[in-house]
């Protein structure tokens, strides 16, 4: 088993060496922040406030604590496995190709559904600004323009793709920073007064909803085969991005709650825009609506940079035909994987079937995190190292994966049975695909 894993790593590294390690700490941090702060933060404060009221920031703190555990596991694993595929690669190296494939499928399906949904939100936002673009045909043109432009940027190389993510990340953070920096002076303190400590169920329900405003690092770590000095870059970027995200989220919730009070829960579609209108007038509302549009585009930009690398990794490792691991001879980017992923996402976007995939996200992402945290412990026990570099180490790190798994199980308790059933069906179908592919490879 160990010998097979070693050969698998060596084979994968030979393929990955065709790629360019052009992602440093600033670019990776920006990619994680862009993958994490999406269009959801522009609407989710109302939902959290409905369940917890002024105690809503407590849910953000609980999520941040859980994410510290998860991010630490990812940082440990990422410093030891620098292959393209991110969490999928960590699980594959630790548990073998089959379990790694299941982890990759969990990620791939949720990412595909999420990006298709966000592109639909983006098209709706554009139609509100320019009504002419709201017709069915023009919506398709807008979607095609979004995917087409990002495909061209990313095929030209990882540096161009990462650069686009950095620019978009700054652009979408500006409206949120304006909202926080100005709104903090208009907070009405009584609106933040707690009436009592929230119950366990209400807090748990809020956390399972809110945890997905924090996830996104799994997307940004997929191009690990193109990260400079991953043993140093991955941990630093992961923690820096988590700090930035947590501070922004908590300040946003406090400003929204402090300016609108109980009325925040009555604006589920655009709570931040309504809050901004309170202290900046219609101009502030327009700025936040525009920010939501930019944020949606930023999410898609980051996703097109990262998620196609999953298809590349599947092709590299034999789970899909090797054709999908093709590298552009000039730009040295995974061109076939990028075009394949964008095509699938585009078809889902125009068909609307992304809604059926979105239901998988709650349980699927957490199950993927569960596998990665378990893989982290295995990688440490085996002392796996990336390119012989010194991995991320600290005293007592062996207990972190166990604490992370306990946190995941607590969050999963608040999921619905339907989500478990749907995820189980997807894993069963993925297993059949894997077995069939194995039979085809053996016959070939």
Image (cartoon, rainbow, N blue to C red):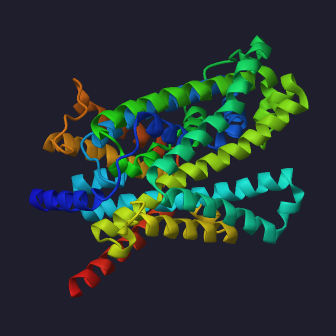
Q: Which residue is drawn at the image coordinates 76% and 33% (left, top)?
A: 272
Answer above or below: position of 196 versus 137: above
* Image coords of residue 344 (percent x, y): 56, 70
Q: Quadrant of residue 170?
A: top right
Where does residue 324 sit, x and y in percent of width and height?
39, 71
Residue nearer the viewer, 288 or 369: 288
Q: Quadrant where the C terminus lies?
A: bottom left
What residue is drawn where x is 66% and y is 48%?
296
Residue 265 visible in this rendered orientation of the protein: no
In the image, farthest residue toward the front: 330
Compared with 226, 270 (above or below) is above
Toward the left, the furthest residue is 3
Q: Position of residue 413 (x, y in %)?
A: 47, 44
At horizontal 37% and vertical 69% (from top left) the residue drawn is 326
Relative to residue 4, is residue 347 drawn left or right?
Answer: right
Left or right: 409 with respect to 167?
left
Q: Is residue 314 left or right of residue 215?
A: left
277 or 60, which lies in front?
Answer: 277
- Whether residue 258 is visible to the viewer of this picture, yes or no, is yes
Q: Quadrant of the N terminus?
A: bottom left
> To which quarter of the image does residue 262 belong?
top right
Quadrant assignment, res 48: top right
Q: Is residue 37 above or below residue 368?
A: above
Count the marks. Answer: 0
Q: Foreground: 260 or 72?
A: 72
| Residue 126: image location, x then y, percent | 79, 53
């Amino acid at each position: 088993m160990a010998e097979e894993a070693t050969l698998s790593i060596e084979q994968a590294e030979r393929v990955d060496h065709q790629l360019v390690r052009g992602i440093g700490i600033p670019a990776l941090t920006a990619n994680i922040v862009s993958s994490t702060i999406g269009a959801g933060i522009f609407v989710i404060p109302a939902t959290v406030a409905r369940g917890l009221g002024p105690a809503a920031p407590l849910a953000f703190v609980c999520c941040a604590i859980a994410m510290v555990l998860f991010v630490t596991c990812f940082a440990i694993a990422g410093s030891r496995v620098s292959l393209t595929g991110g969490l999928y690669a960590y699980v594959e190296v630790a548990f073998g190709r089959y379990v790694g494939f299941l982890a990759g499928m969990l990620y791939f399906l949720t990412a595909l559904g999420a990006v298709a949904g966000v592109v639909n939100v983006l098209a709706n936002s554009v139609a509100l600004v320019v009504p002419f673009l709201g017709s069915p045909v023009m919506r398709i043109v807008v979607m095609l323009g979004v995917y087409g432009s990002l495909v061209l940027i990313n095929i030209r190389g990882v540096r161009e793709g990462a650069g686009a993510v950095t620019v978009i990340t700054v652009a979408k953070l500006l409206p949120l920073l304006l909202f926080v920096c100005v709104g903090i002076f208009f907070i009405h303190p009584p609106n933040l007064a707690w009436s009592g400590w929230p119950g366990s169920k209400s807090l748990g329900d809020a956390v399972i909803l809110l945890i997905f405003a924090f996830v996104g690092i799994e997307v940004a770590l997929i191009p690990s085969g193109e990260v400079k000095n991953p043993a140093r870059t991955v941990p630093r970027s992961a923690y820096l991005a988590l700090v930035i995200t947590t501070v922004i989220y908590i300040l946003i919730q406090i400003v929204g709650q402090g300016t609108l009070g109980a009325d925040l829960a009555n604006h589920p579609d655009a709570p931040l825009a309504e809050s901004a209108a309170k202290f900046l007038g219609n101009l502030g509302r327009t700025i936040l609506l525009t920010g939501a549009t930019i944020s949606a585009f930023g999410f898609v930009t980051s996703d097109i940079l990262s998620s196609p690398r999953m298809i590349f990794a599947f092709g590299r490792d034999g789970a899909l035909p090797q054709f999908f691991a093709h590298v552009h001879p000039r730009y040295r980017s995974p061109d076939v994987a990028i075009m394949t992923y964008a095509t699938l996402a585009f078809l889902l976007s125009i068909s609307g079937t992304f809604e059926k995939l979105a239901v998988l996200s709650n349980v699927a992402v957490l199950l993927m995190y569960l596998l990665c945290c378990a893989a982290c412990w295995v990688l440490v026990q085996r002392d796996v190292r990336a390119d012989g570099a010194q991995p991320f180490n600290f005293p007592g790190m062996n207990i972190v994966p166990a604490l992370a798994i306990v946190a995941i199980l607590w969050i999963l308790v608040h999921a619905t049975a339907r989500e478990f059933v749907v995820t189980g069906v997807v894993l069963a179908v993925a297993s059949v695909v894997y077995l069939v592919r194995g039979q085809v490879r053996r016959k070939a």
